[in-house]
Image: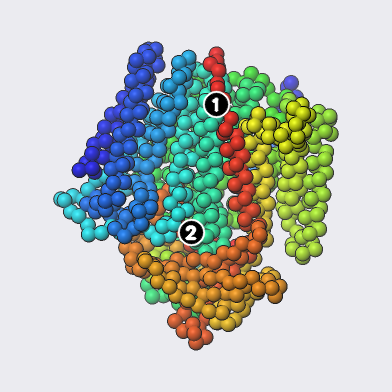
Amino acid sequence: MTAEIGQAAIALSVLSALWAIGFLCVGLRLRNARAVQSGRNAVAATFFLTCISTGALIYGFVTDDFSMRYVVEVSSAAQPLLYKITALWGRMSGSLLFWLWLLTLSGVLVVWQSRKHTRDNLADYALVPIAIVQLFFILLVTGITDGVYNPLVRFPGGQVAPDGQGMNPLLQTPSMAFHPPTLYIGWISMTVPFGFAVGALASGHVGSNWILRSRRWMLFSWIILTIGITLGGNWAYRELGWGGYWAWDPVENASFMPWLLGTAYLHSVMIQEKRHMFKLWNVLLITLAFQFTLLGTFITRSGIITSVHSFAQSNVGWYFLGFILASTAGVIALIVYRRERLKSENRLESLLSRESAFVLNNWLFVGLTLIILWGTLWPILSEAINGEKASVPEAFFNQVVIIPGLLLLFLTGAGPIISWKKLTPNNFRRMFVSPLGIGVIAGALTWGFLAWRGNPMPIYSVLCSFAAVFVLAAIFSEFYRGAKLRAKRQEGSFFDGLTRLVMRNKRRYGGYIVHIGIVILYIGIMGSKGYFLLESDGLKLGESMQVGTFNLTMKDWFQERHANYARAGVVFDVEKNGRPLGEMKPARHYYEKTGQGETDTIESAIRHFGANDLYIALGDLPPNIDNGGIVNVQVYHNPLINVVWLGVAVMVLGGLVAIAEKHQPKPEE
Amino acid sequence: MKRKRVKIIAASALLLIAMAFLVIAGIQSTSVRHFTPAGLVAAADSLNNQRVQVDGLILEGSSTWDAANFELTFAVRAREGNETVNVLYVKRLKPDNFVDGGSVFVEGRYDAAQNLIVATKLMTKCASKYEAADSATPGLVTERGKK
C-alpha cells in the first residue's frame, strides 16, 4: 500500500509544481499577494509530497518489499540497514528521486528564509526557476523516458522476487555511502543562487541584493562539493588499489567543473558588491555553474563518452541536454531584455589592481573549466574535427592544468594584498617585497634540496614552492598586521586581537583560511603526484623487496571468513633503514553472493609515516603459496599525500568561518 | 581611458591565445586514437608502433597470469564479430572485475606484426548487470595506467 501512496504523491507533485509556477508568475505579474502566497505554499506542498514518495521507497527497503522492482535491483534481505537506506541512490531511478527530494527541500528552505521579507519579493521571483527545475525532475521520476522508471512501481501481475540482487560490494563502504549524497547536495544547492540570479533578472532588480541573498547558499554548496569531491578521491585511494586519488576520469571532471565555476563566482561577486562591476558576468557565471551540474549527468548517462564508470546508457542524458539548452536560452532572453540594467557602473582602471586580479582569477577558473571540458569531450570533438575517434589520457590534463594552476596559486596570495583600482609603488613596497623575497628563498631551497636528493629538478616544483611560500607569507602578514592593530586598539593580547579580527570579518578571514588550505593542498599534490615511487614485484614467502628506503619482507599469509565475504592476504614486515616498523597486511576480499557470481576486490594496506604513505596492493594468492608460489604485489610510496587531506580540511574550515557571517541585506533600488 | 581599454583587451587576448595554445599542444602530444578490435585489425599496417586505445570484451578463456614475470596476457574480442587483439600487460596487478566476457578498455603501443598491444593502461567495467552506482559515484576505476 505504501508504494501506491508514494506513486500517488509523485503524480500529485506534478500538479503542485505547476501550481507553484503558475500562481507565482501570475501573482508577481498582477502584484497579487494572495496568489504569490498560494504559489509559495505550493512549493512547500511539493516538498511534502516528495517526502512521502521518498519515505515510501525507504519503507520498501527497510521492510524488504521484493514486489518493488527498484528494491529488488539494489537491495537484498542480508544487506546491512545502512546500505539498505543508501540503496536509495544506488541506481539512477532512485537517485533521481533523491535528487528531487533535495531540490524540493532547497525550495522549501528558500520559502522559510524569506518568510519575513515583506519589503521585496526577490525570493518569490527566485522560486519560479527553482520550481521549474523541480518540475523537470518530477517528470523524469514519473518515468517518461527509457532507462528511468518510477522507483515506486511494483512488478506486474503481483510478482514477488524471493530476494534482492544487492548492491555492488565496492559501494558497500561508509565513504561510498556518503560521497554521492554529498555531491548531490553540493550540486543541488547551486540551484538556489541560480534561481536568485534568474529571479533578479525577471524582477529587474539586478543590483547586489540577489548575490547577498544567495551568498550563503553558494558557500554552502562550495563547502559541500569540496568535501564530496575529496571523499570520492579518498575512497578511490583506499579501495581501488591503484595508489592514486585523482585520474581525470570524465565523471571526476564532471564533479570538478561546477566546483571551479562556483569558486570563480564566489570571487567575482565580491567585485560586484564593492565596485558595482561584472553584473552581467555574474549572472552568466552562476548560470554556467548550474548548467554544469546538469551537464555531468548528460556526460555520464548519454553514452557519448566512454568512462570507466559504467552507467547504463539511456535517453535520460538527452533530456538533460534538452533542459540545459532550453533553460540557457531562457536566461539569455532575460539578459537581452534587461541588458540596459546590467551595465557596469565602473570600469577597470589598471591592469595591476585588485579588480584585475579578480578578472584574471575568473579567466583562469573559467579557462580551466573549458580546458577540462574540451579534454573530457575530446572523444566527440575529435570525431567531429578529424573524423577519428580519439581521447586524451590523464597526462593531457596534468600537462595543461599545471601552468594556469600555478598562476592561480600565485593569485591566492597576490589578490588579497594588491590594492584596489591601481597598484601603487607604495603598496608594492609595503605588501609585496618581503613575501616575494621569502618566496624566492623557498624556491631556491627547494631547488637545492631536490638537487641534493638527486631528484630531477622539474621547474614546476620550484615554482610551486616559491608561490606557496609567497602566498603563506602574504596571508600571514595580513593576519599579523590586522591582529596587531586590533590588539593595540583593544589593549588586549595579540591572540585576542587575532580572534576579534577573524570574528569581526568572518567572510574575509575565512576566505584567507581557505587560501592557506589551497597552499597546503598544492604542496600535497606536488609531493604525491610528482615524487611517488612504485615498485612491482613477485615474491615467495620469506623474500624481500626494496621501495625507496623501505624494506618489506613477506613473512606469512592468512585467510579469514567474514559474514558475506572471505578475506585472504599476506603479512609484511616493514623496515626503514634497518629499523623495524611493524607489520602491514594487504589482502583481497572475495564476495560470494553479489548477484553475479564471485567477485574479488583489492584491499590495500596503507600505513601513514607522517605526511607520507606506504601503500601495498596485493594480487591473487596462488594455491601453492606454501611451496614457493609467487605472490604479486605493487608497493607505492606516496610522499605528502596526507597533506592533500589536511589542505582540504583547512579549506573546509575556512569555508565554515566564512559562511558563519550573517548578512542582512537591505532592500535596494 | 582608450589606451587602458586597448591594454586590457590585449591582455585578455593574450591569455586566451596562451590557453588555446596549451590545449592544442596538449591534444597533439597526448591524444590517442580509439578503435574497436575490428577497426584496429583492419587498419593494422598503418598503426604499427602507435599508441592506440581499444574497447571490447575479454575473450573467454584467453587470459593467463604469469606470476614469475608479473605478466598478464589476454585477448580482446569485438562486441559484435570475431576479430581479436592480443594484450600484454606487465608489472601491474590485474584490475578488479577482470572476468571472462567482461568489458575492458586497453591503451598502449600496438605491434601490428603480432597483433599485440603492450598495454600501459587497463580498465575494466562492472559486468553489465550492474549499473554501478550513480552519476556522482566514481565507480569502478580499477586500474590506473602508467603512474
Instruction: In the rendered view, tell whether residue B89 sits above or below residue A555.
Output: above
Amino acid at the residue labelled 1 = Ile
Q: Name which residue lies at 68% across and 31% down.
A: A500
- Residues at discs 1 and 2 in contact (Cβ within 8 Å): no
Give the chain letter at badge 1.
A
Q: Quadrant of residue A237?
A: bottom right
Identify the residue at horizontal 58%, vertical 42% (top origin). A652
Label disc, if present, on residue A211 of the rendered structure: 1
Q: Which quarter of the figure is the C terminus of chain A placed in?
A: top right
A537 vs B33, nearest the viewer: A537
Q: Position of residue A45 (x, y in %)?
A: 32, 29
Q: Is residue A411 visible?
A: yes
Q: Is residue A402 left or right of residue B132?
A: right
The span from disc 1 to disc 2 (Cα, nearest Å) is: 39 Å
Q: Residues within 10 Å of mark 2 (few under 14, many from 20)?
A: many
Q: Which mark is residue A476?
A: none
Question: Tag 2's secondary structure?
Answer: loop
The colour mode here is rainbow
Q: Which mark is residue B141?
A: 2
Q: Residue drawn at (68%, 22%), measured in percent from left and top? A: A347
For the view shown, which residue lies furthest in the bottom direction?
Answer: A627
Q: Looking at the picture, how far across and down is residue A294, in whole percent?
A: 44, 40
Q: Image quadrant for the N terminus of chain A?
A: top left
Percent of width and height locating residue A469 = 75, 46
